[in-house]
Image: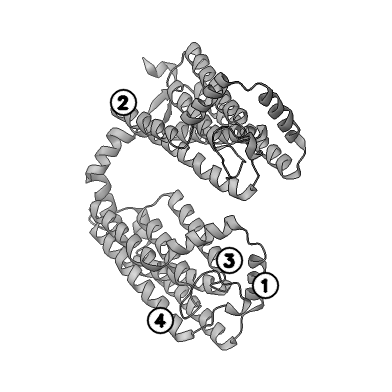
Amino acid sequence: MSRGVNTGAGAQRVTHWWPLLSGLVTVALAVGLGLVISRNGKPFALDTEWMIAVSGNRAPVWDSLALVMNSLGGGLTASVVVPGLLIGLLLFFKRPWAAGFALAVTVVSGAAVHLLKWLFGRARPVELDDLLVSVDFGSFPSGHVANAATLAIILALLFRFWWVWLAGALYTALMMLSRTYLGAHWLTDTVGAALLGIGIAVAVWAPLAVTLDRERRRSRASHPWRTFHDRYVVETWERNARSRRMLQVTAIACLGFGAVVFTLTLLSVQSGGGVTAIDLPVQEWLLEARSPVLTTVMVVLAVVFGPVALPLIVLVVCVGWGLLTRHAWRPLLLAGAMATGVVLAQVIGRTVGRERPPIDLMLYGTDLTFSFPSGHVLGASDFLLVTAYLLLSRRCSMLATTLGLSIAVVGIVLAALSRLYLGYHWTTDALASVSISLIVVGCVITVDTWRTGRVVEPAERG
């Protein structure tokens, strides 16, 4: 092969016939499944059993998640908005061939879905009276799942990162589950749709692989975003092997301890025993300690760590940090950790559904949301612990480390006391929040150490 064609081993491999053949075979499997379904005329036993199983395990939190997936995977959002944003992003990165590939796959996949729906005309599972959304004609294949699988494969082929593959696989699997959960499709509808989307994407990609790979390499080397990324996002810091090992051990300890404490707390809350025995004594002690001055202090703390003030504080800290240091890595880690905490609090709260203490104990207005875990305490813990790590990890002073961690611990204790004192949470709610925060911090340490830490022995420093 000449130098002009040598764009890497990955691109050379895809010049062979097998990717195109595998894509066409996958599409043929989807069409064949549709033919079998059409001739059978009735749902398979697997379809019926799966539908009964998912419809029998519905809950409000899963309904909400499934409806969100329904909005993301269909209509103008999936067919116009998301592909349009992706194509615009690819053009911004100076990858016109990739943009054309994404457009072609999206159009061909959408047309194939509508064609197969018309050819096979499979009835929706409406006879089970489990349909939670409005649907159009044709159950096979699922348009939502085909859109999800197509998008996942496009991104995986154009952006070669393991996490893109993992995210795409999870998104497609969730879409498949949500379509059957909502009663809009049989299980085999989603399987056929996934095969169709994957097969079309791979078949279109195979003859363009070398060109797309060459374009990707040129884009990475020349685009202004690469310069911005290398200058402002990439941050490296040197540690010897012992310091790096200590950080890794700290991350493992945070993850393990946080997971154990959260599991024990959750099991106790669900069973009404275990560590929940401390809830009432702590509540009674704080009720006896109430006073006008202390109440004012606790209300101020609640406002500072609340859903309005704390996000503003995080925004100011992240923007100011980035401008002062001219690096975005650590501000991005802090913002990501805070966003993760918000999502976890919402998902866990809706899943567990624990009731708050009696309304007449609440001193700062009525709150009818779920009690477990405490969002205020989780936000405070994430902000203080992650900020402390990101600041102290670049310093070797034991005094600074001790002082920073002490300030973080005091802040977390005050945030927890304010929520308990004001009558909005049980002690185990705050305990669960801190344990979740330890897990988040463990993840931050792991990612930061892996992404930026470079091991340099003392002899190399001079």
Q: Distance between the residues labelled 4 and 3?
A: 25 Å
Residue 49 circle label = 1
Other residues around mark 2 within 10 Å, as few (<14) / some (14–19) / many (≥20):
few
Counting residues from the N terminus, which is met first, the one under dot 1 or under dot 4? 1
245 versus 111 height, above or below:
above
161 versus 423 height, above or below:
below
Question: What amino acid type is highlighted by mark number 4?
Answer: Leu
Place residue 277 in its image quadrant. Answer: top right
Residue 403 placement (x, y as % from top left)? 50, 14
Question: What amino acid type is highlighted by mark number 1?
Answer: Glu
Counting residues from the N terminus, which is met first, the one under dot 4 or under dot 3? 4
Left or right: 191 in relation to 318: right
Q: Which residue is drawn at 51% across and 18% down?
A: 407
Number of marks drawn: 4
Question: What amino acid type is highlighted by mark number 2?
Answer: Thr
Q: Mark 2 points at which residue?
A: 325
Element at label 4: helix
For the residues bearing labels 2 and 1, Cβ distance under 8 angstroms: no
Question: What amino acid type is highlighted by mark number 3?
Answer: Tyr
